[in-house]
Image (tube, grey):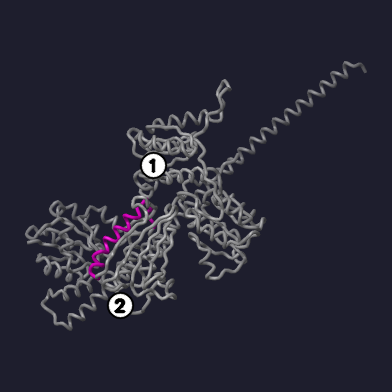
């Protein structure tokens, strides 16, 4: 069973994304509403997520900053991170790609294919 | 008085005279040198000042661009965020993820979903147009196969056509591998898929949509022919305006945004091409035409026009450097056939040695005086990837030495110039491999002309006094200006090579500015020329359209002093990528 951590400051988007992944792929979901809370959630050795889906623009620590912090922590540095962004411009995309994340997905996402997009980005076959 | 003292006196007088004369000569030479030094110092000071001004202007512009970019990016983000929740919630509900929904509710959910999708497309389209209009989406030009792009567009849209029961086919009147042109392939693909999607949407099941491509020596042409309901004559032009659809209900019925064709036109115009709609000659339906110039940087050949252009032969000594002897031989042979003299080099080191040796010999007759001075190198064609000293290092060393820095360099490379902006800035020309003979010749000719001393700004103005005043202003800013008093002079000057900017008065002794613009529009290499129309004549909106070339500005002589026109022209010139522009021509 896959476990996905969703980090987004928008309650509604967390809920919709979680519901979408549970309903279409049957994955388990944990959510966090900020970068800091996300790092804490990912650090729990009992429930280590297989992948992290993280918003880019968040108050406090934004997605890229949170990602860099995660890379400092050897326990969670290996978890693949996908950025979820509403910024679709080329400059933004190139900046994100340069961070070393596993992939960049765009908002608004299609709730019926979000799980498939994640699997494809991470090379998951199941 | 005897003769002797008088002779001595005479000699004394003569030598005093001679001494005075020599002193005067020496003083004069000293003054001349002094003046030359002053002129040089002044020129240097101006060039520094000018560089400083340009740096400031660039900094200001980039701040403005960043602010705009940031705004568009933020608006996009703020609109997308709520839409993400809405789309997600609706999508999950209508897919029945939370249990089945009864038919009436299902219908409402479908309406909400479809309209959410429409809103998302609308936001994307508006942002797209905004980015293009504000110049935030510069074209990434490269040599493309027109057939391959059309094929890709047709393949992409086949699923949609199949779904609608429409037959989609592609035909080409020219051999498929002969139609190459300079374009941003992603953008052109966006246009083609948009046109096909429109054609499919407005055709009924069982009919056909055909794509036909064609080319002539200057341009490529594409037609999308449908058998749909057609566009009324009075709407043929309006369909390219924003939010204009043939029927108001089309937006909701067909799911369009009303911006598709506006985006298409914007992209095609950015490429210097044209797009228009025409009713089919026989039968119902519409034909959408796209015409694009084959070459964005230089015309493959002179355009057919009322003004005769003689077939030009190349002139000058060209040093061809490529580590692949096969390419070297072919290029050398092609250039020789067109009248160039050729030197060959297989490495960057050889290029430097030959260039230095030639530079040292040029100008100075050999010691025994029997040989003519060595012919200087007119241009260097330089491969980028070579073992040993690469093209990049070779170029830098050429530019670093005063003996060779003036030789124009054309890069031959498999990568496009847009991917190596810095390098492209130091080289005067760029040809992407694989290249056609015509492209290579055109680029070489362009570079040779550009460095041959024609002006960067062409001022077409019959008022001599005004022209002199303006030319003086530009010269002080270190920009070369050519002045034409008549239509014919302007045409002759343009035939020598494209200036970076045209300043045009509409009233000319042998015609009007309109006929010049009409002529320029027919020249592939000139139709996107930046233009400043500076005239006392009133111009209507329709006339403004007729006078449009590249970036075009209209200034009224009665309201705008010529100093402001010069300032505007200078900013426009420096927005154009022009690696050959030297800030100050030192003529001591």
Q: For marks 1 and 2, give the CA distance.
A: 51 Å
- Which label is found at residue B252? 2
- Residue at x 38% of width, y 55% of height: B183
- The image quarter in which residue B328 lies: top left
Report the chain holding disc 2. B
Q: Badges 1 and 2: C-beta atoms under 8 Å apart?
A: no
Q: Give the quarter of the figure containing the N terminus of chain A.
A: bottom left
- Label 1: state its secondary structure: strand
Number of numbered labels in the structure image: 2
User: Looking at the image, which is closer to me, B112 or B435?
Assistant: B435
> Do pointers 1 and 2 mark residues of a single chain?
yes
User: Looking at the image, which is closer to me, B42 or B224?
Assistant: B224
* Magenta stretch secondary structure, dominant: helix
Q: Give the quarter of the figure containing the C terminus of chain A.
A: bottom left
Residue B242, x across and y down, in percent? 40, 72
Q: Is residue B145 left or right of residue A27?
A: right
Instruction: Report crowding for label 1: few under 14, some 14 to 19, many 20 or more residues within 10 A (C-alpha).
Output: many
Per the image, the residue denoted by label 1 is B412
């Amino acid at each position: 069973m896959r476990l996905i951590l969703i980090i987004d400051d928008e309650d509604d988007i967390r809920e919709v994304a979680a519901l979408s992944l549970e309903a279409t792929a049957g994955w388990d979901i944990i959510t966090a509403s900020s970068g800091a809370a996300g790092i804490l959630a990912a650090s729990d050795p009992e429930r280590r997520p297989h992948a992290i889906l993280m918003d880019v623009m968040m108050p406090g620590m934004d997605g890229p900053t949170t990602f860099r912090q995660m890379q400092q922590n050897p326990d969670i540095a290996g978890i693949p991170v996908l950025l979820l962004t509403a910024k679709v411009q080329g400059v933004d995309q190139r900046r994100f790609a340069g961070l070393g994340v596993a992939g960049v997905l765009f908002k608004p996402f299609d709730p019926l294919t979000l799980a498939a997009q994640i699997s494809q980005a991470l090379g998951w076959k199941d | 008085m005897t003769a002797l003292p008088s002779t001595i006196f005479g000699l004394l007088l003569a030598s005093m005279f001679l001494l005075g004369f020599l002193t005067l000569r020496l003083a004069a030479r000293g003054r001349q040198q002094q003046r030359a030094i002053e002129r040089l110092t002044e020129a240097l000071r101006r060039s520094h000042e000018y560089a400083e001004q340009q740096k400031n202007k660039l900094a200001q512009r980039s701040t403005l661009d960043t602010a705009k970019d940031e705004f568009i990016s933020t608006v996009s983000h703020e609109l997308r965020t709520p839409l993400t929740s809405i789309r997600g919630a609706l999508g999950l509900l209508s897919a029945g993820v939370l249990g089945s929904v009864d038919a009436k509710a299902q219908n409402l959910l479908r309406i909400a979903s479809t309209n959410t999708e429409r809103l998302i497309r609308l936001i994307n389209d508006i942002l797209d147009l905004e980015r293009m209009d504000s110049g935030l989406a510069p074209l990434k030009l490269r040599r493309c196969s027109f057939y391959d792009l059309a094929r890709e567009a047709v393949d992409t849209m086949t699923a949609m056509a199949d779904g609608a029961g429409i037959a989609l086919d592609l035909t080409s009147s020219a051999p498929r591998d002969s139609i190459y042109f300079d374009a941003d392939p992603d953008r052109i693909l966006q246009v083609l898929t948009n046109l096909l999607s429109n054609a499919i949407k407005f055709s009924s099941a069982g009919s056909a949509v055909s794509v036909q491509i064609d080319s002539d020596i200057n341009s490529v042409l594409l037609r999308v022919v449908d058998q749909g309901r057609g566009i009324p004559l009075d709407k043929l032009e309006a369909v390219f305006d924003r939010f204009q659809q043939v029927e108001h209900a089309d937006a909701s019925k067909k799911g369009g945004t009303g911006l598709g064709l506006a985006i298409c036109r914007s992209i095609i115009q950015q490429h210097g091409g044209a797009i228009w709609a025409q009713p089919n000659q026989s039968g119902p339906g519409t034909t959408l035409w796209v015409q694009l110039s084959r070459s964005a940087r230089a015309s493959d050949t002179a355009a057919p026009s009322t003004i005769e252009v003689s077939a030009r032969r190349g002139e000058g000594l060209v040093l061809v450097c490529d580590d692949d002897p096969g390419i070297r031989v072919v290029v050398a042979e092609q250039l020789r056939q067109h009248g160039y003299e050729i030197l060959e080099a297989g490495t960057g080191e050889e290029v430097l040695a030959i260039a230095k040796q030639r530079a040292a010999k040029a100008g100075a007759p050999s010691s025994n005086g029997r040989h003519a001075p060595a012919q200087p190198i007119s241009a260097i064609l330089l491969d980028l990837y070579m073992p040993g000293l690469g093209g990049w290092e070779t170029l830098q060393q050429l530019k670093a030495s005063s003996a060779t820095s003036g030789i124009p360099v054309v890069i031959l490379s498999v990568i496009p110039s847009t991917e190596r902006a810095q390098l492209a800035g130091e080289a005067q020309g760029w040809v992407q491999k694989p290249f056609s003979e015509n492209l290579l010749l055109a680029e070489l000719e362009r570079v040779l002309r550009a460095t041959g001393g024609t002006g960067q700004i062409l001022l077409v103005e019959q008022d001599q006094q005004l022209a002199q005043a303006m030319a003086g202003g530009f010269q002080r800013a270190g920009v070369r200006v050519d002045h034409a008093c008549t239509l014919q002079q302007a045409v002759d000057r343009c035939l020598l090579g494209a200036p970076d900017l045209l300043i045009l008065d509409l009233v000319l002794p042998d015609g009007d500015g309109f006929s010049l613009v009409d002529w320029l529009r027919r020249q592939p290499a000139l139709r996107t020329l930046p233009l400043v129309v500076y005239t006392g004549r009133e111009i209507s909106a329709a006339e403004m359209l007729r006078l449009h070339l590249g970036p075009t500005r209209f200034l009224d002589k009665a309201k705008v002093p010529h100093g402001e026109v010069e300032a505007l022209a200078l900013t426009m010139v420096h927005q154009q990528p022009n690696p050959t522009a030297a800030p100050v021509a030192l003529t001591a």
